[in-house]
Structure formats: structure tokens, C-alpha cells
Image: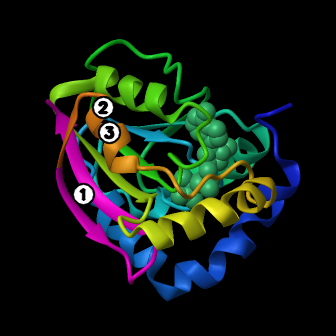
Amino acid sequence: MGWEHPVFARLYDLYMLPQELWGVRARRRRVVGSAAGLTLELGVGTGLNFPFYGPVPCVVGIDPDPHMLDRARRRAGEARVPIRLVRACGEHLPFANGTFDTVISTLVFATIPDAEAAAREVRRVLKRDGTLRFFEHFRSEQPVLARLQDLVAPAWKRVLGGCEPNRDVVGIFRRAGLQVLETVKFRGTFLLSGVAKPR
Ligand SMILES: C[S@@+](CC[C@H](N)C(=O)[O-])C[C@H]1O[C@@H](n2cnc3c(N)ncnc32)[C@H](O)[C@@H]1O
């Protein structure tokens, strides 16, 4: 099944560990710690963000992969805030319009097969004054580097659970009706964090 990556789920924390120690964890803390109010987390994976939530009333976490969700469930039990996990895809969020104050997405828009549809869903489920707080792969603005990203993308996608790191994530958010308020690059890599809100 396209959504199930049992080996990737088993190895994910190990694969991420060097990156977490190199600064990804600190960036997660910054992005996730800024969540306020009722919060939706897209593509929770193994739940690496859960320890960083501040005093929000509840986090609803979605992911389509049951192997990721099994691991996330264990971490949710140790979190300081209530975390409810739902098996769902970003492209079809099972929530009413204007439900959430905050949506968190970290390292997920590169993996969602129809990222444009998922961004529209984020826009739909956010309250009018809600925010999307993200930490995502992005396509380089430099043509040579972008071309290099295109070359490695097919192999990267096969090995890393469907991840396509060469997507224009800011463009995806804008086309979905989100206004990108700020972006901060991460250590010279093709990762950036930022904040967006419904236009
Ligand atoms: C690279 S992992 C990132 C996990 C986590 N967000 C983190 O920061 O560590 C990508 C996650 O996106 C999930 N995913 C894949 N397709 C998705 C979809 N259509 N909607 C939402 N999440 C999806 C995968 O199952 C996986 O857990």
C-alpha cells in the first residue's frame, strides 16, 4: 500500500538523529513551541514534535501510515499536552472548516502526494485568524542547485518514504490561498521554517 512504509517507520528516528542533534530539534522546538490554541499537526510521523508543545488545549495529529502512528501513539503518552491521533491524509482532512487555531507541518509537504490539495485543506480547516507554522524542504531559487535537487529527487523519493525535496513549498502555500508572512532558512540547507495565514 502506498501509505505504508514499515521499514522507513522503524528506521526514521535513527535516520533523523544526526540531523536532530545538528539543529533540527532546536528548530522543531521553535516552530512547535509557537503553536497556540486548538492545533492540528499534519503527518506526525513518529511524534518527534510532541515534546515541544507548550500549553495548548489539545493537539490533533494525523498521518496515513499506521506504522508511523503506532510509534507516535507511544510518544503521545509521554507528552505534556493531550494528543489525539487520527489516521488520515492531508489531502482529505476529516475536520470542519475553520476548526483550528494552528496547523503545524514539519518535513511533511515533500511527502504528501498531492501537496497542493493538502495546502488547500490546511487553508480550509484554519480559522480566519489562524496560522500555519511550518518547517519544510524547499526548491532552491538558484537554477543549478534546483537542477541538482531534481536529479537526486527520484532516488531520494524511493529511499525516504516518498519524499520529494525539490518542491516549491512557498508557491504551494501561496496558490492555496495562504499568505506567507516569514521564512527562515535552516543552516544553508534546503529547509526553511516560517509562518503563513489565510489570505
Ligand atoms: C518525513 S516524515 C515527517 C514526520 C514528522 N512530521 C517529522 O517532522 O518528523 C513524513 C510523514 O508524512 C506522512 N505522510 C505521507 N503521506 C501523507 C499524506 N498524504 N498526508 C499526511 N501525511 C502524509 C508520512 O507517513 C510520514 O509520517
Question: Going by the image, does 177 lie left or right of 47?
Answer: left
Give the residue type that dot 3 points to.
Phe
Q: Nearer the viewer, residue 1 or 88?
A: 1
The verdict on label 2 being within 8 Å of ligand 1 is no
Tag 2–tag 3 contact (CB < 8 Å): yes
Give the residue type that dot 2 points to.
Arg
Task: Measure the alpha-carbon separation of dots 2 and 1.
Answer: 24 Å
Residue 94 lies, in percent from the top left, at 50, 16
On whether residue 193 falls in the magenta region, the answer is yes
Q: Earlier in the sequence, mark 2 or mark 1?
A: 1
Q: Residues within 10 Å of mark 3 (few under 14, many from 20)?
A: many
Tag on residue 169? Answer: none
Image height check: is 162 above or below 135? above
Q: Quadrant of residue 140?
A: bottom left
Q: Nearer the viewer, mark 3 or mark 1?
A: 3
Task: Measure the alpha-carbon separation of dots 3 and 1.
Answer: 19 Å
Q: Which residues are magenta?
A: 181-199
Residue underneath mark 3:
173
Q: Nearer the viewer, residue 3 or 30?
A: 3
Q: Residues within 10 Å of mark 2 (few under 14, many from 20)?
A: few
Which residue is depicted at the point 61% across and 46% down?
Answer: 111
Q: Nearer the viewer, residue 114 or 107?
A: 114
Which residue is depicted at the point 67% across and 33% down?
Answer: 64
Give the residue type that dot 1 points to.
Ser
Q: Quadrant of residue 14?
A: bottom right
Tag on residue 34? Answer: 1
Question: Going by the image, does 116 lie left or right of 12?
Answer: left
Q: Earlier in the sequence, mark 3 or mark 1?
A: 1
Q: Secondary structure at mark 3?
A: helix
Image height check: is 138 above or below 5? below
Residue underneath mark 2:
175
On whether residue 187 falls in the magenta region, the answer is yes
